[in-house]
């Protein structure tokens, strides 16, 4: 189909200094967890986006010098010729598809405490970054940079710029955001200097300006120079000469870079979870930039709707549509708009599993796109599959795993039947996506069902509760069992070892709440799953008017939600909804009127009033159907997948379903192992 003329504007080229972006789709720098230790994995990950139509593909933060070492968080480096070779794989891949390649030159300053390289962290004034987050920070405190340190920093950027050009990059970023070193100079709280780099806004901007000039001079104007800048805090600050310090900073820098990449200040606000933050949430902070500069402006906002993108351009907010998460969830987003296939876009759900991967120190994982990070290692392309399926496959269970398995099998060419006992497909998401803030998660179901309905080789059987005999009678060549998992009413003992079920009246699990049970209040939610569901159920019950106490053995609500940037917002939401929070406690007993708790370390016993309890803790895989079938079905024709195989988050179920479908009928190939290029002096060992 031809593209909708309404979207023509998205495909206009944009001049960025000496380079031209072929359209307005710009994959901005984002963490991928892919360091120079996995150069082929990284190149293929970015190449897929270039192939999918993004005009610019960027690296994540790329350290200019060993004094910016983010370990244990993964980051790229541009320190030597081995790094040049590693990045050249990516730039060549981007250029093969007509995209520009950008590198985010980066120095973390006080944010990076250099756990591996053991350099003293650098900072304008010795102010520690986020000392309340010891997991991110450490006991190290940064040194105050002297004039020589500043000269070194500028030189390191210039030298890295030379290496970046050698590696084939077209756009070189200076990164003055997210609390990193140049941003620390911009903020009055972290910059208390009295020299030419501190004090007035004019002085605080100086370092950023000099870095831009140094990068440009080092590459003789051949590469475009971009400035990535965080504006949230600056916009909140009054200025004597402008509406805010952000206005003053942009005015001073208006002609310095070839491109402004504008963003928020922290991971939690910049890469905000959809649970609490809508699409386009950056606009109130960054909307003024274009009025102060003629240079092109790129920004993000989890944009997946082309209408929203067009509106951002027509209203003069942005020139280029930045995408990080939308480009992970669907690397082919621009191509799909261009080809008039908007309904085929696999929209990001804003769950932030991707950013959790970086916090976990691993390659990016995506709930919507199971092929992310597997392009090179397993040879998985997000859009193209081997068309080798000839058999009839029955998939039992239409949750995230079953839907993904059915779709992937159908794309391979199999005749696919998908059955679920429920009237509607979607499995756990049928109900979970109705919880407060989680409605966008239903895109996991919508996308797959929409695609399945278009395929002629797919039959959908809702309201089909299949027994082992039913499955046998169906006579499929292969059976995929994706029947999900069950929550258990079990408690947690001392040492966090699971114990038996809590035997008392009015004890519920998420299944009961999903079935429509409204517990008697006051209700306690005991959450030792520690991801989103416990806190979402607490919010749901509070919104129903119940008095809710949330109890967790972790140190904070939604303990694992720190990984997905949800945790701070969960706490804010609890406060707003009047949900009482009890941390570092586990439930030890309940008599229907009083809940007994124990402090996890001291064992001290406490009691609170409660009429009912919801336990969000352990899960058991629901493989009874599988067990019955395996009695007489050959193992190579029977496949267990998703939560029924091993209970996990939706990202795990989708990945599991995808992998089952890719590998069905063939040998599970061992994934390829990547390796870094040898650093100078060790090449002979290669
Ligand atoms: P996953 O996350 O692994 O996809 P879910 O729990 O979301 O798992 O989905 C499992 C689905 O399987 C549910 O929609 C459930 O109704 C369905 N299901 C479970 N057992 C059967 C069965 N015997 N026949 C048909 N559908 C089933
Ligand atoms: Fe979007 Fe979630 Fe995928 Fe990240 S993991 S890109 S937030 S769908």
Image (tube, rainbow, N blue to C red):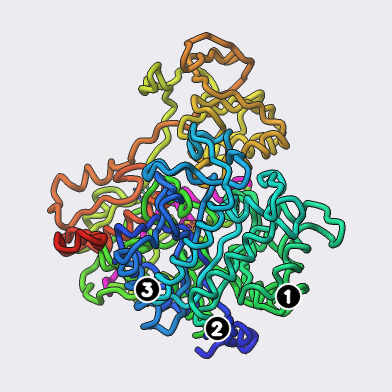
Residue 511 seen from this side: no
* Magenta segment includes 39: no
Ligand 2 near label 1 (Cβ, under 8 Å)?
no
Residue 218 seen from this side: yes
Instruction: Give percent across and percent down for residue 561.
Output: 52, 41
Q: Which residue is mark 1?
A: 293
Q: Is disc 2 placed on a helix, strand or loop?
A: loop
Q: Is residue 635 left or right of residue 309?
A: left
Instruction: Give percent across and percent down for residue 220.
Output: 51, 80
* Magenta segment includes 425: yes
Q: Is disc 1 placed on a helix, strand or loop?
A: loop
Residue located 37% across and 43% down the image: 116
Upstream in the sequence, badge 1 or badge 3? Answer: 3
Residue located 34% across and 68% down the image: 84
Q: Nearer the viewer, residue 192 or 546?
A: 192
Quadrant of res 657 = bottom left
Dot 3: few (<14), some (14–19), or many (≥20) neighbours within 10 Å? Answer: many
Q: Is residue 486 above or below residue 479?
A: above
Tell me the CA gap for discs 2 and 3.
Answer: 23 Å
**Tag of residue 71:** none
Q: Is residue 410 left or right of residue 560?
A: left
Q: Nearer the viewer, mark 1 or mark 2?
A: 1
Upstream in the sequence, badge 1 or badge 2? Answer: 2
Bounds of the magenta segment: 413-436
**Tag of residue 23:** 2
């Amino acid at each position: 189909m031809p593209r909708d003329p309404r979207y023509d504007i998205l495909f206009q080229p944009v001049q960025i200094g000496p380079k031209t972006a072929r359209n307005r789709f710009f994959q901005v720098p984002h963490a991928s967890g892919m360091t120079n230790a996995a150069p082929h994995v990284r190149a293929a990950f970015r190449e897929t986006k270039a192939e999918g139509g993004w005009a610019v593909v960027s690296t994540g933060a790329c350290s200019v010098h060993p004094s910016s070492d983010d370990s244990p968080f993964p980051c790229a480096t541009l320190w030597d010729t081995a790094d040049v070779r590693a990045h050249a794989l990516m730039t060549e891949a981007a250029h093969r598809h007509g995209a520009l390649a950008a590198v985010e030159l980066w120095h973390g300053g006080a944010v990076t405490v250099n756990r591996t390289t053991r350099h003293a962290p650098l900072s304008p004034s010795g102010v520690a970054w986020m000392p309340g987050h010891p997991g991110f920070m450490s006991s190290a405190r940064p040194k105050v940079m002297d004039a020589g340190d500043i000269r070194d920093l500028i030189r390191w950027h210039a030298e890295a710029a030379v290496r970046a050009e050698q590696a084939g990059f077209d756009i070189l970023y200076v990164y003055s955001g997210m609390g990193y070193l140049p941003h620390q100079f911009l903020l009055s709280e972290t910059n208390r200097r009295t020299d030419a780099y501190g004090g007035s806004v004019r002085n605080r901007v100086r370092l950023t300006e000099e870095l831009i000039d140094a990068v440009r001079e080092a590459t003789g104007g051949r590469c475009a120079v971009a400035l990535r800048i965080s504006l949230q805090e600056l916009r909140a600050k009054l200025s004597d000469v402008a509406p805010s310090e952000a206005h003053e900073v942009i005015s001073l820098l208006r002609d310095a870079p070839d491109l402004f990449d504008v963003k928020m200040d922290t991971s939690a606000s910049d890469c905000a979870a959809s649970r609490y933050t809508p699409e386009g949430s950056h606009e109130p902070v960054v909307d003024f930039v274009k009025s102060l500069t003629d240079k092109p402006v790129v920004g993000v906002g989890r944009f997946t709707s082309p209408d929203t993108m067009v509106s951002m351009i027509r209203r003069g907010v942005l020139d280029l549509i930045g995408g990080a998460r939308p480009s992970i969830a669907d690397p082919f987003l621009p191509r799909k708009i261009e080809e008039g296939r908007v309904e085929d876009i696999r929209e990001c759900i804003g769950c932030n599993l991707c950013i959790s991967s970086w916090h976990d120190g691993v390659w990016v994982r995506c709930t919507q796109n199971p092929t992310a990070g597997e392009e090179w290692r397993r040879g998985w392309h997000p859009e193209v599959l081997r068309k080798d399926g000839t058999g009839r496959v029955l998939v039992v269970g239409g949750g995230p795993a079953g839907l993904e398995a059915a779709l992937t099998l159908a794309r391979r060419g199999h005749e696919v039947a998908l059955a679920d006992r429920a009237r509607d497909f979607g499995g756990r998401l049928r109900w979970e996506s109705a919880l407060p803030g989680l409605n966008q998660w239903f895109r996991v179901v919508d996308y797959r069902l929409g695609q399945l309905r278009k395929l002629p080789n797919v039959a959908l059987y809702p309201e089909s509760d299949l027994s082992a005999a039913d499955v046998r009678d169906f006579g499929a060549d292969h059976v995929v069992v994706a029947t999900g998992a069950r929550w258990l009413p079990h408690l947690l003992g001392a040492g966090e070892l699971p114990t038996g079920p809590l035997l008392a009246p009015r004890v519920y699990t998420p299944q009961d709440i999903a079935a429509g049970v409204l517990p008697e209040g006051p209700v306690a939610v005991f959450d030792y799953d520690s991801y989103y569901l416990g806190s979402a159920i607490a919010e749901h019950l509070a919104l129903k008017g119940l008095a809710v106490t949330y109890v967790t053995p972790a140190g904070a609500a939604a303990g694992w939600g720190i990984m997905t940037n949800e945790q701070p917002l969960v706490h804010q939401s609890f406060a707003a909804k009047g949900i009482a929070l009890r941390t570092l406690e586990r439930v030890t007993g309940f008599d229907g009127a009083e809940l007994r708790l124990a402090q996890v370390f001291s064992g001290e016993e406490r009691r609170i009033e409660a009429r009912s309890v919801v336990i969000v803790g352990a899960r058991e895989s629901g493989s009874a159907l599988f067990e019955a079938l395996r009695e007489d079905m050959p193992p190579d024709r029977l496949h267990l997948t998703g939560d029924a195989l091993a209970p996990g988050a939706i990202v795990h179920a989708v990945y599991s379903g995808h992998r089952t479908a890719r590998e069905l009928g063939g040998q599970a190939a061992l994934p390829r192992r990547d390796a870094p290029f040898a650093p100078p002096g060790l090449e002979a060992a290669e």
